[in-house]
Image (tube, rainbow, N blue to C red):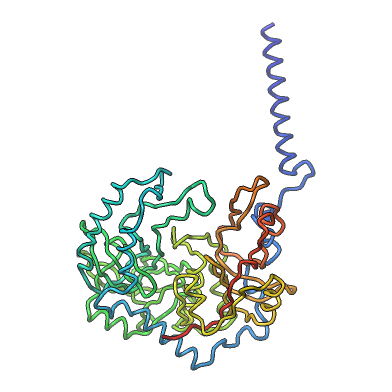
Amino acid sequence: MNIFLRTQRKALHILAVVAVLGFCLHLTGCVSGQRLSPQASLPIEDLSTYSQLTNSYIDPLGGNSELLTPDQAAEQAQYMRRMWFSPWHRSTPGAAAYDIPQYLKRVDPSVFYGEDMRPYSSAWKQKLELRSQLRSFPNSGFAAITIRNTALRLFPTRHPAFRDFRKAGQGWPFDLLQNTGVWSQTPVYISHISQDGAWLLAETHYAAGWLPAEDIVQVSPSLQRRLESSDLSAVIVDNSPLTDVYNLYRGSARIGMLMPEVDGKLLLVVPDASHQASVVQVQAPPMSVQHFPYALTERHLSQLADSMIGQRYGWGGLYQNRDCSSLLMDLYLPFGIRLPRNSFQQAKSTVSSISFEGLERSEKLALIKEKAIPWMTLFWKPGHIMLYIGEKDGVPLMYHAMWGLATRSRSGEEGRLVIGRVSITSLVPGREDPRVTRTGKALIDSFQQMSFLPVKVE
């Protein structure tokens, strides 16, 4: 009897395993002998319908033509260079730096949640106020340079602050204390030091915020003159390794970095044993840097854009990734075009623009087809900005870093279909998904303005 029961149990176990395997095979489509294609896991059809390489859309005849006149290119590059080094010519904090302490004073800690999904207390705010020693602002003032990739924070803490995790677009990854990422070798002005000395209030040419004290070194006036008088090179291949004369790795160069160059060698500022500024010569892989400014052509823009395509979305530069506005700021910097950091400010910064206010979808589409210039037209909607790269079979295409698309369930609950990457899409991404179409609004419906590069020089 025991042998029979054991045999029966074994048979039942085998049948159960076979049944489960059969069910799994049915779910994965293996019963027909076919495997799901890699595209099946993509969140929207646009990512498989349209090539995710921008060079697929380059005009074969005009792709090497300059998009700016020589005078325009020179004016833009001079402005970019002047703004890049502008933090070293401050003697007092800028307006953005004054906004940072005020933000801490106004904030209600009870509306912020930590990484444990629990609300912060008033004690959390009091601790940060004590660390910030805001009553003495500004208590410092000196020129410095970042020596590693870092970030500007709204409060002097690495801990995040989220809104309600239950609401779409308010939980992770939207850390509201993350102002922006900052690449290594970026000139900064330090206007304030925290009570414990661990945090510094810094200003770049595009943003302000708190960064860790170990991420910068002070720059002497003589070193400033040396670096500012040098030729500059722009990084055109993202994540290019930098090695010194001993072939030691010294970091990775990112698109959006400018580096001084002397006799074909790049200059890298590093800390010495006393955490004072020292300069070493480094080299990057062939063709990964170019003399600044790089010639502004469709083909060159495509080269840089494809170096970043598919990269993960990074809210405020989290995890050293890019969001929509940092993607475009970095993309155009090597060409001498200085875009601001915020998407709204980018849309306002250009020499001309056209409003979509009051227009229906069909009217917007007609205006896009008539007026948009590939690689020189930005499209803005509240909270997001995109670059027009041309058409494919009459369909306008956008290059952008997007987190996701708004969705609505059958019960009316709002959510997000996460894209989470740098991608190329149409004006109606997700149109095949009922959760997206149920919202009644496509990407193009939210467009409020198209803006034409280059930027205004101030």
Q: Measured along the vertical axis of the image, is residue 95 above or below residue 160?
A: below
Q: Nearer the viewer, residue 18 or 157?
A: 157
Q: Measured along the vertical axis of the image, is residue 246 above or below residue 25?
A: below
In the rendered image, residue 211, in percent from the top left (x then y), is placed at 32, 62
Q: Residue furthest bottom?
A: 71
Q: Residue furthest front?
A: 358
In the rendered image, residue 214, in percent from the top left (x then y), is placed at 27, 61
Q: Nearer the viewer, residue 384 or 283?
A: 384
Q: Quadrant of residue 218?
A: bottom left
Please state, as top left, top right, bottom left or bottom right, where the N terminus lies in the image: top right
Q: Residue furthest top?
A: 1
Please state, as top left, top right, bottom left or bottom right, where the C terminus lies in the image: bottom left
Residue in the picture at 47% in, 62% down:
321
Q: Is residue 244 left or right of residue 315?
A: left
Number of marks in picture? 0
In the rendered image, residue 95, in percent from the top left (x then y), is placed at 33, 73
In the rendered image, residue 324, in percent from the top left (x then y), is placed at 52, 66
Q: Quadrant of residue 12?
A: top right
Q: Measured along the vertical axis of the image, is residue 135 above or below residue 329?
A: above
Residue in the picture at 64% in, 51% down:
408
Q: Measured along the vertical axis of the image, is residue 225 above or below residue 327?
A: below
Residue in the picture at 48% in, 79% down:
349
Q: Nearer the viewer, residue 17 or 359?
A: 359
